């Protein structure tokens, strides 16, 4: 490279190249990268695949910088004296002058020509020191702590800890095993004062009930006097707690996390379609946690949805096909139950037959329901609307997870409107045969046991025993959301996948298999569909919104297939905070 | 494969009728028989013989007193001097157990229990002794000094269910162990 003024003028400096794109140059551990202006140092390191250990920083929350674990060494080019040209290396970057003291990476933003060192003697000494301070008052009750196995303090004391304590004095005593809310247990001795939970309750949940009292080593996390941590989002604080200070009452002492298998899936309790991870061991679900998806639920989920899985292996679970004989239901084989169902359906004219499907069914199941209606020859097909109050964060008013999918798959604008005419038909006797898929008509759709008693034939598929099943002539046990694969479209038009975390209980069958077998029993045809992928393939060929997609192409983050204009309130809040520069993630 | 041809030794007539060897063997046996009757078998003392030869007359006579310090018998749970069950059901032994013989159901200690501050203890603790390979990994991994391999080696049963040691049986075998680290003391 020549030093003549004309040559340098022709060659663009890296600084100018980056500025054109609105980026800045940052050297991380000796390698130059470009990042958007305003990025935090820790976020830049993460994007460059360099992990900076941290406790208090969370990409979805503000950065108070109080754990001091993310200390790194920073360098900037020295300011030249007036008239002096900045010194540059052979690539045109200015020579970095390293600052002899560390800075925290989580609360500082990057600047042009900045250098970050995440290794080296200074940084490692700092981390060791911070770890030693954090462990001074830590009770080390890992054997009884639910966080063991997914504890940042454990992980980082393995990487950066000393192995032995030099602290000879008594540890500070703090409240243990405190019930600060109906679903959360607090252990103050384990707390490392990262304040993530305080910030979450304040910034995301909008219910600032947590705070610190006392000072120094006696700092104590506590709930506001006369208040409880009873927000419907309180369990998220247990998720983000880097140690075992906040733990879930529901999961308390159930199972160690290292035994659990993680299955990515989606929540089916409302139209938002929160992304979740299902944690299982030996065909038993132990807990459900939210999974990061910036287009749906960010990193959070409501407690009411998270805890709604205990019914799957509960008392009311149906595990065998049942056929009514007299006033009682008796267990029957699948083949026999399906054959008698088909015979009963055929015996009643198609005009007197109706199907009531559910907004909780997957796209594949709804597609087969459409095929079932065509096979029977009825146009009386409706879904049961389930509406409740929405909150201003993640819970949608529509408690059916797949209303949008039903509209697309069934090709109707309003999949619920025929329900009233079916109900009237049942009451006035023009409908004699009813196939109910999944929903409980008596609880959710204003039917009475008397109405259903008028029917000549009532078939129900259901996960749980319910009043409608009580009236049904044939009850077929189906699979719960964690036991099946399939896809759903949330209110915002995002196609997402359910995955099978556990096998169906007892003899329960996957819903799409029940529908397939019922269609085959009616038509007497030969089975050609063995995999749910084949059902989705047929769906993708028949419904334009799904064209070109397969189950595997949807991916764990989902695919946007429709524009409904629906806004998830929590995401709007988050984007506003991001635009204001309060958060980075 | 290479074929190696062995050169058989040439035997003379006396060796061919092997009478001499028979006599030799007979005398060796008789020497030992006499030694046994006189109680002077080699190694009789070290092997805790019953007095006739080196053979131990099991089950009338047992190894028990001669087991070495490091003998690894049945794994069992122990209580300490204060009568506290030491296991807190951290499930590390369940995790480390190579043949997956251990099964634990954890539970919370009720708040009116004198040891409520320990918070956690096993509701059920089962070791399937058909599966157990006496490797001692459970003892090694235990952070609470709660499980030890004792010197019990006669683990028998008439049914498979008999071979599963439950919590009661495990504490029965384990008994009380003194001088362990008192982690959950008053200061805790």
Image (spheres, grey):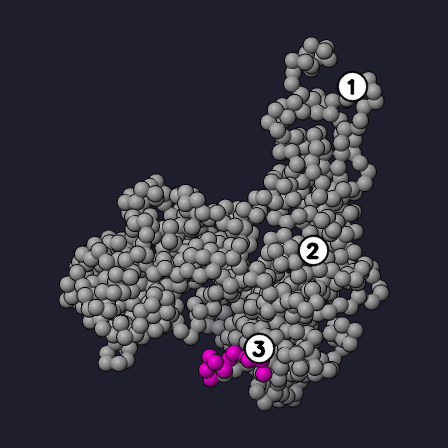
- Residue in front for this viewpoint, B156 or B53: B156
Left or right of B80 in this view: A391:
left
For residue A386, above or below residue A292: below
Q: Is residue A476 left or right of residue A238?
A: left
Instruction: Tell me residue B95's x, y (percent).
Output: 57, 65
User: Relative to A559, is A196 above or below?
Assistant: below
A505 left or right, relative to A336: right
Task: Give me the residue at 31% from left, 69% from top.
Answer: A447
Estimate how packed mark 3 is, as few (under 14), some (14 to 19) or many (20 or more) residues with alpha carbons within 10 Å. some
Relative to A199, does residue A117 appear above or below in the rendering?
above
Q: Nearer the viewer, mark 3 or mark 1?
A: 1
Q: Secondary structure at mark 1?
A: loop
Residue B159 painted magenta: yes
Q: Is residue A366 magenta?
A: no
Residue at image mark 1: A85
Q: CA distance from mark 2 to mark 1?
A: 45 Å
Residue at horizontal 55 percent and vertical 79 percent from the top: B165
Residue hosting label 2: A195
From the top left corner, tell me how far across and down residue A368 is, in percent.
28, 55
Characterize the local packing of mark 2: few (<14), some (14-19) or many (20 or more) Cα atoms within 10 angstroms.
Answer: many
Dividing the picture into quadrants, the one containing residue A83 is top right
Q: Residues within 10 Å of mark 1 (few under 14, many from 20)?
A: few
- Regarding mark 3 in the picture, which secondary structure is present there? strand
Badge 2 element: loop
- Which stretch appears magenta? B158-168
Residue closer to the observer: A363 or A432: A432
The disc at residue B123 is: 3
Left or right: where does residue A411 sit relative to residue A100?
A: left
């Amino acid at each position: 490279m020549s030093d003549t003024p004309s040559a340098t003028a022709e060659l663009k400096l890296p600084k100018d190249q980056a500025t054109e794109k609105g980026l800045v140059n940052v050297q991380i551990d000796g390698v130059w990268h470009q990042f958007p202006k305003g990025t935090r140092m820790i976020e830049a390191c993460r994007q460059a695949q360099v992990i900076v250990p941290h406790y208090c920083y969370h990409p979805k929350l503000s950065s108070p910088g109080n754990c001091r674990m993310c200390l790194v060494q920073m360098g900037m080019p020295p300011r030249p004296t007036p008239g002096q040209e900045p010194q540059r290396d052979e690539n045109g970057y200015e020579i970095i002058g390293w600052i002899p003291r560390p800075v925290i990476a989580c609360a500082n933003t990057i600047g042009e020509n900045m250098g970050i060192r995440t290794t080296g003697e200074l940084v490692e000494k700092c981390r060791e020191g911070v770890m030693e301070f954090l462990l001074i008052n830590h009770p080390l009750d890992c054997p009884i702590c639910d966080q063991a196995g997914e504890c940042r303090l454990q992980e980082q004391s393995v990487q950066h800890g000393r192995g032995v304590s030099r602290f000879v004095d008594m540890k500070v005593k703090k409240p243990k095993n405190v019930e600060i809310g109906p679903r959360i247990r607090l252990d103050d001795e384990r707390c490392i004062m990262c304040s993530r939970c305080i910030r979450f309750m304040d910034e995301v949940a909008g219910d600032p009930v947590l705070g610190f009292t006392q000072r120094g080593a006696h700092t104590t996390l506590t709930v506001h006097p006369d208040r409880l941590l009873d927000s419907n989002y309180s369990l998220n604080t247990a998720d983000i707690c880097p140690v075992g200070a906040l733990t879930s009452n529901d999961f308390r002492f159930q199972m160690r996390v290292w035994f659990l298998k993680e299955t990515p899936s989606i929540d089916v309790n409302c139209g938002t379609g929160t992304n979740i991870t299902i944690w299982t061991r030996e065909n038993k679900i132990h807990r459900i946690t939210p999974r990061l998806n910036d287009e749906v639920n960010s990193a959070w989920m409501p407690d009411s949805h998270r805890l709604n899985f205990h019914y799957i292996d509960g008392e009311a679970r149906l595990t065998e096909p049942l056929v009514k004989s007299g006033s009682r239901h008796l267990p029957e084989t699948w083949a026999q139950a399906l054959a008698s169902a088909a015979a009963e359906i055929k015996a009643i004219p198609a005009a007197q037959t109706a199907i009531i499907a559910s907004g909780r069914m997957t796209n594949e199941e709804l597609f087969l329901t459409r095929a079932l209606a065509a096979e029977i020859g009825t146009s009386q097909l409706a879904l049961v609307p389930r509406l409740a109050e929405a909150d201003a964060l993640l819970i949608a008013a529509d408690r059916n997870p797949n209303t949008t999918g039903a509209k697309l798959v069934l090709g109707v604008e309003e999949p619920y409107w025929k329900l009233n005419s079916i109900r009237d038909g049942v009451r006035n006797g023009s409908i004699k045969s009813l196939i109910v898929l999944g929903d409980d008509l008596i609880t959710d759709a204003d039917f009475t046991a008397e109405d259903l008693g008028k029917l000549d034939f009532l078939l129900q598929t259901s996960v749980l025993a319910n009043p409608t099943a009580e009236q049904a002539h044939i009850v077929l046990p189906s699979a719960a959301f964690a036991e099946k694969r399939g896809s759903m479209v949330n209110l915002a038009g995002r196609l997402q996948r359910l995955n099978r975390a556990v096998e169906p209980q007892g003899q329960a069958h996957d819903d799409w298999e029940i529908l397939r077998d019922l269609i085959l029993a009616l038509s007497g045809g030969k089975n050609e569909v063995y995999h749910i992928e084949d059902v989705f393939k047929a769906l993708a060929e028949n419904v334009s919104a799904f064209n070109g997609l397969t189950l595997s192409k949807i991916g764990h983050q989902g695919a946007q297939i429709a524009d409904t204009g629906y806004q998830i309130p929590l995401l709007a809040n988050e984007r506003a905070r991001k635009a204001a520069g309060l958060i980075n993630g | 494969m290479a074929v190696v041809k062995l050169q058989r030794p040439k035997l003379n007539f006396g060796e061919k009728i092997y009478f001499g060897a028979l006599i030799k063997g007979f005398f060796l046996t008789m020497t030992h028989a006499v030694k046994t009757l006189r109680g002077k078998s080699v190694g009789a003392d070290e092997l805790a013989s019953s007095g006739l030869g080196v053979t131990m007359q099991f089950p009338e006579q047992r190894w028990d007193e001669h087991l070495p310090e490091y003998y690894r018998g049945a794994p069992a749970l122990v209580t300490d001097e204060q009568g506290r069950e030491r296991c807190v059901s951290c499930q590390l032994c369940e995790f480390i157990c190579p043949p997956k013989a251990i099964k634990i159901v954890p539970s919370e200690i009720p708040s009116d229990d004198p040891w409520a501050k320990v918070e956690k203890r096993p509701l059920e603790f089962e070791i399937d002794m058909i599966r157990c390979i006496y490797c001692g990994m459970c003892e090694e991994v235990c952070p609470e000094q709660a499980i030890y391999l004792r010197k019990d080696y006669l683990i028998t049963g008439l049914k498979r269910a008999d071979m599963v040691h439950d919590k009661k049986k495990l504490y029965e075998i384990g008994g009380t162990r003194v001088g362990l680290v008192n982690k959950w003391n008053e200061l805790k």
